[in-house]
Amino acid sequence: MPHLSSLSLDVTPTAAASCPGVTMEPAEEKGDPEPSKTLGAVNEEQQQQRVTDASSIEADLTTHGGDHREEHEKPDKDTDDSDEEDEEEEEEEEEPPKEPRVREAPEDIKLEAIATTMCMHPSRDVMAVGDLDGDIFLYSYSCTEGETRELWSSGHHRKACRGLAFSDDGAQLYSVSKDKSVLLFDVEQGKLVKRIQKAHDSAIYSLAVIDENLTATGGDDGVVRVWDFRQGTYVMEQLEHTDFVSSMVVGDDKRTLLTTSGDGTLCAFNVRRRRFDVKSEVQDCDLTSLAIVKEGTKVVCGSSEGWLLLFNWGGFGAVSDRFSTRTESVDCLARVSDNLVCTASMDGIIRAVSLLPNRVLGVVGQHGNDPIEALVLTGDGRFLTSCGHDQLVKFWPADELRRRKVNDYRRRVQKNRPLLGLNAKADTADDFFAGLLEGAPDPTAPPQSSQGGKRRHESDSDDSDDSDDSD
């Protein structure tokens, strides 16, 4: 059968007439008739039109709707990053700031030179430290990490600083040095207020503040002088000692001045009456330090043999009791309570010692194997501070020491028994105390002479750069 597109319709009057039942009417004349089109041509035109329309629609979608579709399908990367950063910033803002760590005791203070002396402010968390170079530093200390800082420093001494003391109100700071000078500072401003250039004929070793006007100093030659800073001169001089004045303490009455010396004696002076009162019998060792205990009824002295000697108040002529601390020497002594003192020596160990009953309780802390130069209780009594040849100032909790109960019963001490660490800080010394023995000589045996305390004094005096020259 032939395809329809190949057929043409011949509609002529003749053909119409030949077809029965078909009536033809004459066509109206409308000008030139359009040429006839085949079905194939019509179909091709329609197909092309469809293709054209489809292409137009697709192009239109691509131009106007494609971007929107991509925006919905693929979000903008920069916008997402910005949103994430905003969320992170909001989270950071919401997180509370980290609080600084609060320690059991203030952080150690690292010094540039060996500390030789220090003292504590009577009412503030402030301390003064003097070193072997003659420099003086004032620090504020805190249990909060990062808050311990230096307040001011002074370099007015030309040789080692040997003694520091605050006035009773804490407004002034006194210092003495191997250069024979006595200095007075304003604590708040750190300014030098007064200087006594050649206060002694020999190097000055010790210092004690009596009251707001009077200050006592002791020299390497045993001379004791009491100074009135209003006049700028000394008002009392005593020559009872024949060797260096190792330590000085003023009684609660502000009248009695007690001194110990390398000559092995304890002396008492009446400051108000400007006179010498009494001198103890000579001991077979240097007396290196002292403290008033038992509510002012007893005086305890450290010695170069490691003994503690007890004197009755008012009976300074003779020793009432003595016992060993199981160490080579007692170079430093600090009163913690009426019944408890702490001692330090050249072995770098701080020991807690009970008085009446007399007993070594254990170890408070240590400076390794380095000698300890000073041992002081803070003004509020919370911490025991120490400084040594390791160029560190360390703080040790003292409250728990006062809470310790001592049994009056004297148990037999087992030899080669390690001493007890009395706080967590002492127990974390990498088993340093494992080899520390509690074996001790017989407390009733008389001490034998050695150079423990004297060595500490001579180690300072014999420095090549600190020879005593005239000022």
Image (cartoon, helix red, strand yellow):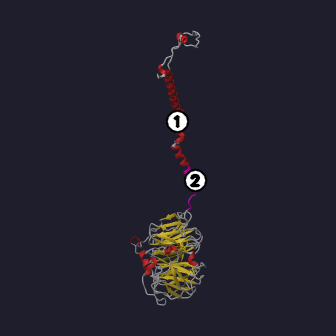
Give the distance between the C-alpha atoms of the residues marked 1 and 2, in whole angstroms: 40 Å
Amino acid, disc 2: Glu
Q: Nearer the viewer, mark 1 or mark 2?
A: 1
Dominant secondary-structure state across the stretch colored magenta: helix
* Secondary structure of residue under mark 2: helix
Query: Residue 83's x, y, as percent?
Result: 55, 47
- Residue 93, numbered label: 2
Amino acid, disc 1: Gly
Q: Depth check: 383 or 446 in front? A: 383
Q: Depth check: 279 or 77 in front? A: 77
- Residue 66, numbered label: 1
- Residue at 53% in and 41% down: 73
Q: Depth check: 275 or 413 in front? A: 413
Query: Residue 25's x, y, as percent?
Result: 59, 10
- Dot 1 or dot 2: first in sequence order is 1
Query: Residue 154's x, y, as percent?
Result: 49, 65
Query: Residue 386's x, y, as percent?
Result: 50, 73
The image quarter containing residue 29 is top right
Q: Residues within 10 Å of mark 2 (few under 14, many from 20)?
A: few
Q: Quadrant of the C terminus?
A: bottom left
Drawn side of residue 436 relative to residue 187, left or right = left
Asked if the residue under mark 2 is in contact with the one under mark 1, i.e. CB atoms within 8 Å, the reply is no
Where are the magenta residues, as a range? 87-99
Which residue, as the protein is rendered here, is positioned at the far front? 20
